[in-house]
Amino acid sequence: MGTGRRSGRRDQEATVPEASTAGGSGGSGAPRSLAEALRARDDAALAALLRARPDLLNPVPGDITQLATRAGTRASVVRALERLDRFALQTAEALAVAPDPCPYEVLESLLTGEEGTTGEDNGARAALPRALGTLRDQALVWGGEDRLRLVRTARELLSPSAQRPSPTGLGPTVAEATAGMSPTRIQEIVATVGLPATHDPVSAVNALTGLFTDPERMSALLDEAPAEAHQVLGRLVWGPPYGEVTPNPTAPVRWLRDHGLLLPASARTVVLPREVALHLRGGLAHRDTAPVPPPVPAHREHRPQLVDANAAGQALAALSTVEELVKSWEHTGPPVLRAGGLSVRDLKRAAATLDTTEQSAAFWIELAYAAGLLAGDGEVDERYAPTPAFDDWCELPPAERWSALASAWLPATRTAGLAGEQDAKGRTLSVLGPELDRSAAPEVRRRVLELLAELPEGASPDPDALLDRLAWERPVRSASDLRARLAHWTLTDAEVLGVTGRGALSGFGRALLEHRDPAPLLEPLLPEPVDHVLLQADLTAVAPGPLRRPLGDTLAVLADVESKGGATVYRFTPGSVRRALDAGHAAADLHAFLKEHSRTPVPQPLAYLIDDVARRHGHLRVGAASSYVRCDDDAMLGEILADKRSAGLGLRRLAPTVLAAQAEPTALLEGLRAMGYAPAAESLTGDVLVARADAHRTPPRSAPVPVPDGPPVPDDTLLGAAVRAVRAGDLAATAVRKEPASAAVVPGELPRTSAAETLATVQAAALTGSAVWIGYVNADGAASQRVIAPVRVEGGFVTGYDHTADEVRTYALHRITGVAELAEDHL
């Protein structure tokens, strides 16, 4: 394909960072820029690049040159480097300190050492083609095997400097370190090491570089150094290469400085030149290379059936915990903080309700929120409350309820483990607050489970080995401990949720990971719900298993949970019985309920407790005046007035059977109940108000959307369309055009033709079936280049096949700025 006047200049400008150091073609057919290297790729390779680096698709590049330019931007390169494994990153780091361009053999020696200087091969030589292929696929490296080039932005990010030490621990080259030195000082070093004198500073530096890169002469020079000098070099050789010196350095340091083995970096700092360090290292760019991922061996092995049974028990407990948590917020949920989130006090209350730690309570709260079971109610004084989806969730079978929770947990970016810590501005991160999203969480969570899935069934890994593997796969992000902490939290959360059992991935957890429905695998492992309890004389009831929904709901209102486990113990108290009466149950209904669902006779103390509370329930009536208390027994009202505990309620007698209060009805109810009475609330018409369990729900709310970790990975359809668009745009940008003699051509600008010439050219192309190049300005004023094959020209419009868009389009003739025929052999 030829290159026209405009496209040639544009391609060169777009690839200046790569082409400015090309130094020749490197052989016939070798790419001279990253754009040329990308242009030579087939469609599958371009699609693989866009899949690996989806940020390059936003928006779709207009042509290959624009794609190459965008691939070299700092933000995109940083993102690509963050997704390299350790050995691919070490390969890029070695290229950053290697000559540019770098032959493959030089790169290999930097990673494997000079021949005869290393011990047993650790696999770096065999793994290098794979690592280099990864860098090529992601457009971080281009060029032939004899001229490998790291993209300029990556070289700048990975190269050493005084402000940013290299990951390899290497310092600047001799040429870079002597750039600010006086020619006299350079000549002194050259004379000291016995090199021929020269008045050209560049030649002197080249001669010094040649000495330091010659193994034999370098060894001879180091043999002359004092023993203490070798100790100084040993402290700098693996980095950092900078050292501080006093105005009067010791004799070994002076010897090293006089011989150029240490060069001044500032008034009080010296640096070990890269060439010297590489000689001392035996040619290695890194002290330790990691060509293969560390294994994650099985640490303990269990029977798969035992793992599944243990995980199923945890899953059942998780369902109970989430349900208990959300129901505890049904009537008066905790308020939403002004900045969003839950207060520390309310988190402690939730932990006490669930009988667990605050960290564990934070996990369950965030899980319920991620599953869309609770949210803010949106009122002026906003509070957290169950959503309507919670009622639907409660009606599902247990296995399906667990599947909904686990499916919400796996892709969630909410990170409960960060709750209680401080952000960069010193503000405390609160549960359900807006600052707990971490986009890396889903990727780490899924990767941890994938590593567990690679082990034999029933096997659990050593957590340290698993963390080492994750650090190898993403070494840049592992520089901060967030990724390791996310992995720790994943192991803990997966265990309490039931995805794993005894540290091993369960069968239904494996189904969840593989995007299969885990409910059919979990359902046989869960105990069948029971429809009865065992009443005991000490006012307790034992549920020998999970209770069926109507029985469980009613019993949860009538009694308080005292202990959980394989069997749940409920305790009946005056307060719990009053709660059932407040919910609209009559004493006779409660007796019938217990008789129906108990396998043991109803104990007499329990029957007496129900009758006693029912006899006093509703004897007092509370309504809104500010509030009032009415009772047919005026002696009881007198007793209340005489009680010192009622002083804060502001009571006064209005009539023999009525007391007025300054407190609100809710506060008055709570105050009288704290004094040991059992008042009932009543409406304006005097009817008893029934408090039902589903009293408060938020408006319909969807589950929170996870925060994406960068652009989403495109699907095959989008990739195919993007590659076609880039190819078509490149075709238009690099097309060879026959420019009319009358066209006012300015290099780098669109040629312009008159309306008559434009019409004549497109009509001729429509008759001959040939393609033409046009410049077009749309209705929004955006200019573009198109390659079209006109089919019909009429009514001021030209219709033809647009090679750029890969479809038939119609263009207004008056919006075409210029037209040119393509070279005969172009299409």
Image (spheres, grey):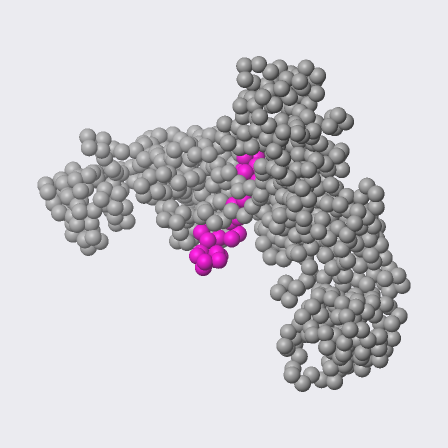
> What segment is highlighted magenta in the picture?
403-431
* Observer-nearest of 466 and 579: 466
Direction from residue 332 to residue 721 in the image, left or right: right
| Residue 227 placement, left or right of 329 | right
How many numbered marks, from 0 up?
0
Residue 754 in picture, x, y percent from top left: 57, 26
The image quadrant where one finds the N terminus is top right
Residue farthest toward the front in the current orientation of the protein: 742
- Residue 105: x and y in percent read 84, 54
Screen quadrant of the C terminus? top right
Nearer to us in this view, 257 or 422:
257
Q: Is residue 415 magenta?
A: yes
Residue drawn at (78%, 73%), measured in percent from left and top? 199
Identify the residue at horizontal 79%, vertical 47% (top origin).
25
Asked whether the viewer can see residue 89, the reply is yes
Residue plotted at (64% across, 77% down) = 268
Where is residue 568 drawn, in percent x and y? Answer: 49, 42
